[in-house]
Image: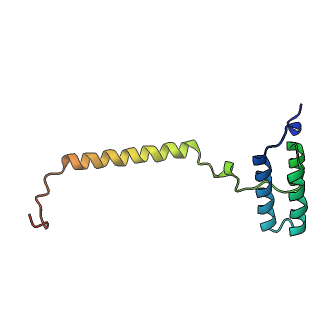
Amino acid sequence: MQAVDIRAADADRERVLAELQRHTAAGRLSIDEFAERAACVYRSRTMGELAVQTADLPPDANSDASKQIPRAIWTALILAAVAVALLGLAAVATAGPMGGVGCGW
């Protein structure tokens, strides 16, 4: 059994409809073309039938996969946050009492 023969779920249909809406908003599809393809999406039973509806459209550059932050950046951000926290703790530990200057004590 090929992947195109796998039954499509409602979530798969909604994903394809959202993609068609983005392409319509970008001017790649007319409203009539969108309506035709949307009707086909609702009739689709397999992933292959869904794939046909977007086969002639370019991949979406703003997909969720392209929005993910690489692991190296997350690691750098976490290390920077830890360094700032440690520097703050060191500053608090070495600071003397404030003495209430300007606080009316």
Kindly tell me whether residue 47 is visible in this rendering.
Answer: yes
Question: Is 21 left or right of 5, judged from the image as shown?
Answer: left
Question: Is 73 left or right of 57, judged from the image as shown?
Answer: left
When the figure is inspected, residue 54 is found, relative to residue 76, above or below; the finding is below
Rendering coords of residue 10 (x, y %): 78, 47
Rendering coords of residue 13 (x, y %): 80, 50
Colour theme: rainbow
User: Quadrant location of the C terminus?
Assistant: bottom left
Rendering coords of residue 44 (x, y %): 88, 48
Total number of numbered discs in the rendering: 0
Rendering coords of residue 39 (x, y %): 89, 57
At 85% from the left edge and 43% from the top edge, which residue is drawn?
Answer: 47
User: Quadrant location of the N terminus?
Assistant: top right
At 50% from the left edge and 42% from the top edge, which residue is drawn?
Answer: 75
**Residue found farthest to the left:** 105
Kindly tell me whether residue 55 is visible in this rendering.
Answer: no
At 82% from the left edge and 56% from the top edge, which residue is drawn?
Answer: 58
- As rendered, which of 45 and 16 lies closer to the eye? 45
When the figure is inspected, residue 6 is found, relative to residue 95, above or below; the finding is above
- As rendered, which of 90 and 103 lies closer to the eye? 103
Question: Is 28 left or right of 101, judged from the image as shown?
Answer: right
